[in-house]
Amino acid sequence: MFTGARRSGSALSVYAVGVVLALAGPAAWSAPAVATPSWATTLAPSGQSCDVVLVDHAGVLSADESAAIETAARDFRSALAFEVRVRVLTQEQAPHLESWVDAEEQACGSWQNTSGGFRDNLVVLAFTTDTAQDTGETVVFYGDQAPSALDDEWRDIQADVINPALNVGEWERGITGGLAEIRDVIDPPPGNGGAVAGVVGVAGVGLVGGTVAWRRRRRRQELAARFTRTTSQLDELTLKLDPVTESLRRDIELAKSAVAAEEIEVALGDSEEMLDSADQMIYQRSELSADRDQLLSQRSLAALETDVQAWERLETKVRGLLPRLAEEEARIAAVVAVDGEAADRLARADELAADVREAAATGNAAGYVVTDDAAVLDVYDERVREIHRLLDEKRLIATDEKLSSLISDLEASREALGRLAQREADLAERLAALNREQAEIEALEGPAADAEAALRTEFAESISVPIDGKVEHGREEIGSAAGLLDEANGLVQRRDLGGAECRLNDAEAAQGLARAALGEVTERLKHARRLSESVPERHASVSARVAALRSLVTQLGSAAPQSVRSEASAAEARLSDVDLTGSHPDWIALNDELAAIENQVNAATSEEEKARRREEQRRRDAELARQRRAAGATAAVWGSSSSRRSSWSSGTTRRSSFGGSRGSSSRSSSSRRSSSRGGSSRRSSGGGRRGGGSRR
């Protein structure tokens, strides 16, 4: 039975779930994003989020990124009369992205046309984030008002625009860039092949070819601009890099000859490693420059993107290394310069020592005792001799430290001797304040002694163990502070200001220790009494939580994980050991034990909730699979009749997201007469690959 005794002891990727261009009210543009809902929420939305342009379930977008994406979608809608929906999820929220979009479409009436199929002027971009085991997925779906040119372009848009940006964590660039590319395919700019597509019209062969060529030319121009800008900046940085590295090399060689062996490692620091990094970067630039002139002429946009990124990464590294090299060069140069500067600094120390002697003489003449304030003069000659010895041994770092310390001490001494009258007035005020503080602390002694007695008589012995000796310690510090205050008062009377300041500093420290010791005793009594009232209530609350957990485990039956069942039993056993009825209970230990049980129950409840969600997901997946089989069977029946085949082809069709031909398959239920077009592809860490439905 427990009676109170203590027991011994980004690169982020995304399942792109979404840019959906669906008809929705204007309020959808400003509706708040839903942060990381459960699977039940994302699979079957209540209706409010269906018409929201951007929903960041994964919580990866900043406020600025979200605003930029919503603005791009708003412009898209204004220009083309298309609605945009963007969804970002984790892979835990959408382990099967296409199934997630299926369920979302079924739940959202605004994503459907009048026949129940995918809305004609709807485009959906959906994303999932990476996990440690797998990269995320990018999905693009669009309705039948989009021209057929988009069928040839969505794979390239993902591979060349969206995925490369998402692979380096640039969500805003990837999503807004993808929207811009889709917009240009739906409504090509003038001069891209002699034809301008209507949103609803069917594009001709010339338009498709012109759109593809124009989009690829524009992408190539963007990459060329990035390459030109990066190489120009890198050329400028390299011009700065060479003189800095050469200067650093010279300083390293000087340091090796000027600094003693026992200090050389500290003197050089990371400088040689930095030089190695600089040499590697220069070599890398040379390697990249080998085909610099031919880089922009390569055919593959994905390969061009990879090469441009290599130049950009190198430029970033060189830009970051330059200031570090400069700082290291200045630091080593300062070490080497110590030998040459020592004579001037020693002369400065002599001047300060003379000032201190003069100020001490003036203070003595005014009746002050300046022994402590001028103490630096007593060891001045010895410290100077030590500095000369360190210089002879080439221990320049130690020489610098000793010189800096000596000059600092002389300056402090001169300052103190120069304001004796002001210090005397300040000491009088401080002494009076500390005497008042002393009276307040002495008044704490009695209540602390009473609190100690109450802790020993009203509660378990274990409660009072931490405050054993605290009251006695407080008394000792009070006595020490009183003696120091008396000494300080005498020194003030004799006008020994330095000695008085030292005594007051010590007295103030002793008062702080006394207040802390006595206060700890009284606070522990207050804490124990508060817990004596609150622990019974907490015990009742924890008991209810344990009972609720047991009820959940019983309801789940064999589906309950073994770990949850074990935790529930362990929590029940621990709770039964908590005894509140004994005499002199240790309320602090009891409260700690109840907190531990509560944490155990919380963890088990969370695990049980995950198990319940997994079971629900399994059932949903099984139901979706059943619906697909039923839809496939219905399509087969329809396909047996030529008239039905004609009727099927005359309606809008849904394109498979895994690269199927237009109208070749249906992912919707048999009640739908039109379906989504588009597809999905896994993003590799390097990006740039094309194809729908492949997991890389």
Image (cartoon, rainbow, N blue to C red):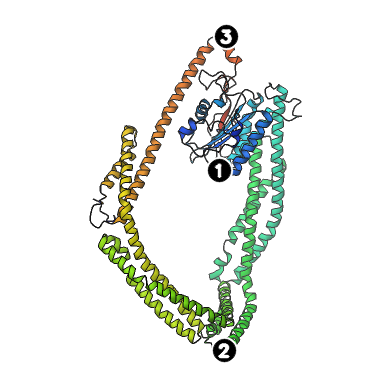
Which residue is under mark 1? Answer: 11
Q: Are marks 2 and 1 in contact (CB under 8 Å)?
A: no
The CA span between labels 2 and 1 is 73 Å
**Front position among marks 2 and 3:** 2
Give amino acid for label 2.
Ala
In the displayed structure, would residue 499 be above or below residue 119? Answer: below
In the displayed structure, would residue 278 be above or below residue 541? Answer: below
**Front position among marks 2 and 1:** 2
Number of residues whose C-alpha sits closer than 10 Å to that of mark 2, classed few (under 14), some (14–19) or many (20 or more): few
- Where's residue 117, x and y in %? 56, 21
Q: Nearer the viewer, residue 174 or 388?
A: 174
In the displayed structure, would residue 687 be above or below residue 276? Answer: above
Q: Earlier in the sequence, mark 1 or mark 3?
A: 1
- Where's residue 513, x and y in %? 40, 70
The CA span between labels 1 and 3 is 52 Å
Q: Earlier in the sequence, mark 2 or mark 3?
A: 2
Which residue is under mark 2? Answer: 366
Q: Nearer the viewer, residue 674 or 108?
A: 108
**Where on the picture, by quarter, is residue 544?**
top left
Give amino acid for label 3.
Ser
Q: Identify the element where label 2 is drawn.
A: loop
The structure residue drawn at horizontal position 60% and vertical position 19%, both measured from the top left corner, is 652
Q: From where the camera sits, is residue 180 visible?
A: no
**Front position among marks 1 and 3:** 3
Which residue is under mark 3? Answer: 643
